[in-house]
Amino acid sequence: MKGFQQTLQNKISIRGQALHCGKTVAVTLIPQPVDTGIRFCRVDHPEQPILPAKPGNIVDTTRSISLGTDHWRIQTIEHLMAAFHGLAVDNLLVEVDGPEIPLGDGSAQYFVEQILQAGLAVQEKPRKVRKITAPVWVTDGDDPRSYLIALPGEGFRISYCFTSDHKVTGTQFAQYVNDPETFQRKLAPARTIAFWRELEVLRKQGLALGGNMEIAVVVGEEGYLNQLKYDDEIVRHKILDVLGDLYLLGPLEGEIIGIRSGHKLDLELALKLEEHLG
Ligand SMILES: [Zn+2]
């Protein structure tokens, strides 16, 4: 999206339970000057290290996106990044006092509400929107049916095809044109997916996620085990993840097409795209 760069009017703190370590984590969003981008800081670390949200600073893409180094990391940054992308927030320092961003209800809704409550501040310089200048794609060797494709185009659009043999979810397709109003209405509330049989395994391992029905669309053998926000909530969340992950490149112009892709391909595409952006 074009227009002027934005930050927040006020600093805000968002608290929530971290999924893996189980403790309460505070995420503080601090307004920043133009051209500084999105940066993350682990404030509970003795050196309080800061890293920009860039593809080269991602250290893990298993189930979520983790930013950091060999010595420290911040896990599950993608839904917060999706909120920044969807609302067109350019410059912020994100201080986190723990190893992961709280999951909330598994969507970006909570972050969006807090950001809008703090208020967006329009800054004095135009956004630097980078154009996808040539077709670029990645595919997963472990799943040759999965693709993530970037094409030149006007505006910024994401199309996604979710396919599954699971009889409850079936195949879902959706298309999203990036715009803050559409983002708030159609994408931000879409929650992540969890299969009941996987939750049971996690619960047996003693992880907090096990059995928690508040943080995901839970898919049982015969049907959904909680109320859906949209009939196609799963594919909407997949688009939310792509939106968050690709914000590691900042605002983009072009078209993205995902088929069965996930965080691993998002990062591979982002790394490859860096060489093909205008
Ligand atoms: Zn997600």
Image: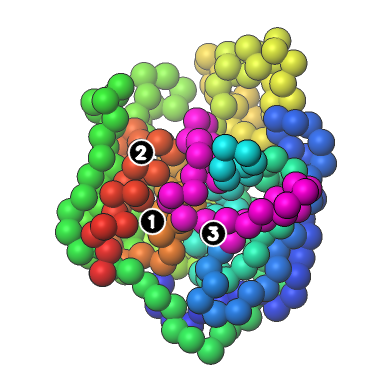
Local SS, label 3: strand
The residue at which mark 3 appears reads as 52
Task: List x then y, in percent, for residue 11.
Answer: 75, 70
The one of 106 and 23 positioned closer to us in this rendering: 23
Which quarter of the image is occupied by the C terminus? bottom left
Residue 240 visible in the current orientation? no
**Image point (36%, 19%), residue name:** 165
**Image point (43%, 51%), residue name:** 55
Mark pair 2, 1: CA separation: 19 Å
Task: List x then y, in percent, for residue 94.
Answer: 66, 59
Q: State yes or no: discs 2 and 3 in contact (Cβ < 8 Å).
A: no
Q: Nearer the viewer, mark 2 or mark 1?
A: 2
Mark pair 1, 3: CA separation: 27 Å
Give the color scheme: rainbow, by chain, secondary structure or one colour: rainbow
| Magenta residues, start to end | 39-67
Residue density around tag 1, few if under 14, some if 14–19, many if 20 or more, within 10 Å: some
Local SS, label 2: helix
Mark pair 2, 3: CA separation: 20 Å
**Does residue 141 sit above or below 88 in this rendering?**
above
Kind of residue at badge 3: Pro
Residue density around tag 3, few if under 14, some if 14–19, many if 20 or more, within 10 Å: some
Find the residue positioned furthest to the front. Answer: 47
Residue 176 numbered tag: 1
Kind of residue at badge 1: Tyr
**Image point (82%, 41%), residue name:** 24
Task: List x then y, in percent, for residue 162.
Answer: 36, 34
Kind of residue at badge 2: Leu
The residue at which mark 2 appears reads as 265
